[in-house]
């Protein structure tokens, strides 16, 4: 049951061309909605039934998010797609932009219709130049076919679709930082409330959805919300794109039903490379706490199961590490990432990420002090829940996760000034 | 040059560059041309040899009718804007987790040795510069790097050699 939604038509040559997309029913749902003037509430109900939850990492129910917009509000409304894919380990949205951009264009137009937005933006990270060109080409083709612009298909509905390219900042994946960035400012997250549904882009009601979320919409509405929901499991409807990387033989992006055993995903990725042994798995991007390989082998890939195991499904980015991997070195690199990417707005994150990085870095380099493990736990505690956005939590959670399962490695580094793992000795 | 002294927008940049920036401004609602600041900086950086100077930033500010500080903030917040000269080929090497556990250290070391430069440096002939970057969202092809608009994935020292030869 792989490749049922976004990757459904990947067998087609040049799926990124509009004729190919249309040959398998592409733009039919949008056309039907606009011709029949489907009540937006009906579409929202469909999205709620589908069980689709935000695929960027937070997992917020999509139908519910759309329902927060007052479509009759006397101001502009905006639809924003978040293609600022930057969570380490995640590389699925890049594939959507490259291989199925029209599903995203159609999904964005449907969402815009639902919330009564006449302008929609796709925020694509600036490094994704080639995927951006592919997506821009899809917009141009859709415009030529009458799906973008004024009075779409004679329906009276207007919608402009544009791309805003980022400039290299992880924090812009946070939705309000992303809005600041579209407004041409530094990407510093906004204090909430007010939430974007009330005060978003240019102060107007705004919905921000992830690329994968919006690209799922046409198939959900065409094939039926129940069919999508039933692909998955309770509380985790549908299928999901999993990016799997690290020490596996065939890393890549796989679309699988929610609730698929991790062991199946692992098999699809060819298992371990060179007969090495699995040590640990980061199940949902670098912000999600690490889980030992043998624990992971018994888990299924859905929100509840991974949460129960003390981690997060996040963006579905799975990083597999073999037994030559030094966890201190991994956390050292992760610590540097969050320190580098903190926007500097909140003191606990700005200062705390520096503390975390410096402490782990000295442990990794044989300068660890006896009190460092307690200090790490203390510092991560002082960040969690004390910042405007989730970047602070994202920096703190992996620290606690590493110490939960691999404290002995950190202790060994401190005691012996060297690594207990062969490869790093 | 002081941005405030610039009176006529038509004196700034070439007509082609102005058209390119105007195309970006047109993507946003009227009165929201600040939204085009990131694109304008990117365009100007590209024609300025890959980096920005205060003069260029002031021109962008004047063109968008913004206080220069609004442009400085953006230009210094985002990592893709450069404030020191870079090589004709800016090699952006990812060293984040998936790349790191796939031996990005070896890639960096090979580049260090072969080019004789470290991160943040430019070769004497100006052909290459080296930059460490955070996850570029291509972990399935780790280790990887970006040069210009292109991603190079599944790097090995041998593959690097042939890529470097191709880059003028």
Image: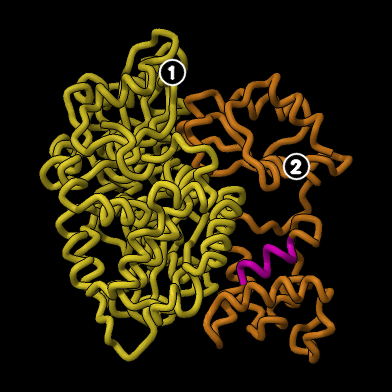
Chain colours: A yellow, B orange
The structure residue drawn at horizontal position 41% and vertical position 62%, both measured from the top left corner, is A81
Kindly indicate whether the residues beneath marks 1 and 2 are on one polypeptide chain.
no
Please tell me which residue lies in front, A322 or A179.
A179
Image: A264 above or below A420: below
| Residue A417 position in % (x across, y down) | 42, 21
Which residues lie in the magenta part?
A: B37-45
Q: CA distance from mark 1 to mark 2?
A: 32 Å
User: How many numbered callouts?
Assistant: 2
Q: Which residue is mark 1?
A: A249
Reply yes or no: does residue A286 show up in magenta: no
| Residue A44 position in % (x across, y down) | 21, 66
Subunit under mark 1: A
Q: In the displayed structure, does residue B84 sit left or right of residue B32?
A: right
**Furthest residue in direction left, as rendered:** A234
Image: A217 above or below A262: below
Reply yes or no: does residue B43 show up in magenta: yes
Tag 1 secondary structure: loop
Which quarter of the figure is the N terminus of chain A placed in?
top left
Mark 1 Cα shell of 10 Å, populated few (<14), some (14-19), many (≥20): some
Would you say the magenta stretch is mainly helix, strand or loop? helix
The structure residue drawn at horizontal position 44% and vertical position 26%, both measured from the top left corner, is A251
Mark 2 Cα shell of 10 Å, populated few (<14), some (14-19), many (≥20): many
Q: Which residue is mark 2?
A: B129
């Amino acid at each position: 049951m792989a490749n049922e939604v976004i990757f459904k038509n990947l067998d087609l040559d040049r799926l990124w061309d509009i004729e190919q997309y249309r040959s398998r029913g592409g733009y039919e749902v949008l056309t039907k909605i606009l011709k029949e003037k489907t009540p937006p509430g009906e579409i929202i109900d469909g999205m709620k039934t589908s069980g689709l939850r935000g695929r960027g990492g937070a997992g917020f129910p999509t139908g519910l998010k759309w329902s927060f917009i007052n479509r009759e509000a006397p101001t502009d409304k905006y639809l924003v797609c978040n293609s600022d894919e930057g969570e380490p380990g995640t590389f699925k949205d890049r594939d959507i932009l490259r291989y199925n951009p029209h599903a995203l264009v159609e999904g964005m137009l449907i969402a815009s219709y639902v919330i009564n937005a006449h302008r929609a933006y796709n925020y694509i990270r600036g490094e994704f130049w080639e995927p951006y060109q592919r997506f821009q080409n899809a917009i141009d083709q859709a415009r030529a076919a009458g799906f973008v612009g004024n009075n779409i298909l004679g329906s009276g509905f207007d919608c402009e679709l544009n791309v805003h390219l980022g400039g290299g900042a992880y924090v812009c994946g946070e939705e309000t930082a992303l809005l600041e960035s579209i407004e041409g400012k530094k990407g510093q997250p906004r204090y909430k409330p007010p939430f974007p549904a009330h005060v978003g882009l240019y102060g107007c009601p705004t919905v921000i959805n992830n690329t994968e979320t919006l690209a799922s919409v046409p198939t959900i509405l065409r094939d039926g919300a129940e069919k999508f929901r039933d692909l998955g499991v309770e509380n985790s409807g549908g299928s999901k794109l999993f990016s799997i990387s690290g020490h596996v033989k065939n890393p890549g992006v796989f679309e699988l039903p929610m609730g698929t055993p991790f062991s199946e995903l692992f098999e699809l990725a060819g298992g371990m490379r060179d007969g090495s042994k699995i040590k640990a798995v980061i199940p949902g991007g670098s912000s999600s706490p690490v889980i030992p390989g043998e624990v992971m082998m018994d888990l299924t890939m859905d929100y509840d199961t991974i949460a129960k195991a003390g981690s997060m499904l996040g963006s579905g980015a799975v990083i597999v590490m073999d037994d030559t991997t030094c966890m201190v070195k991994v956390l050292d690199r992760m610590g540097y990432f969050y320190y580098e990417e903190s926007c500097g707005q909140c003191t606990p994150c700005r200062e705390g990420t520096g503390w975390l990085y410096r402490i782990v870095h000295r442990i990794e380099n044989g300068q660890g002090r006896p009190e460092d493990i307690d200090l790490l736990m203390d510092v991560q505690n002082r960040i969690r829940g004390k910042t405007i956005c989730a970047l602070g939590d994202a920096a703190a959670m992996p620290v606690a996760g590493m110490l939960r399962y691999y404290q002995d490695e950190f202790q060994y580094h401190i005691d012996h000034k060297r690594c207990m793992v062969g490869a790093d000795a | 040059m002081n941005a405030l002294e610039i009176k006529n927008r038509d004196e700034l940049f070439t007509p082609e560059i102005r058209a390119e920036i105007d195309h970006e401004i047109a993507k946003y609602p009227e009165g929201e041309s600040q939204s085009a600041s990131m694109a304008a900086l990117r365009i100007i950086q590209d024609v300025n040899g890959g980096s920005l100077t205060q003069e260029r930033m002031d021109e962008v500010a004047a063109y968008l009718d913004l206080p220069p500080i609004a442009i400085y903030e953006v230009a210094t917040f985002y990592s893709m804007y450069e404030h020191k000269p870079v090589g004709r080929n800016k090699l952006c090497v990812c060293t984040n987790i998936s790349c790191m556990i796939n031996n990005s250290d070896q890639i960096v070391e090979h580049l260090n040795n072969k080019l004789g430069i470290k991160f943040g440096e430019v070769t004497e002939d100006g052909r290459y510069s080296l930059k460490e970057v955070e996850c570029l969202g291509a972990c399935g092809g780790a280790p990887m790097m970006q040069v210009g608009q292109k991603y190079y994935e599944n790097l090995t020292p041998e593959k690097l050699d042939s890529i470097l030869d191709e880059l003028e």
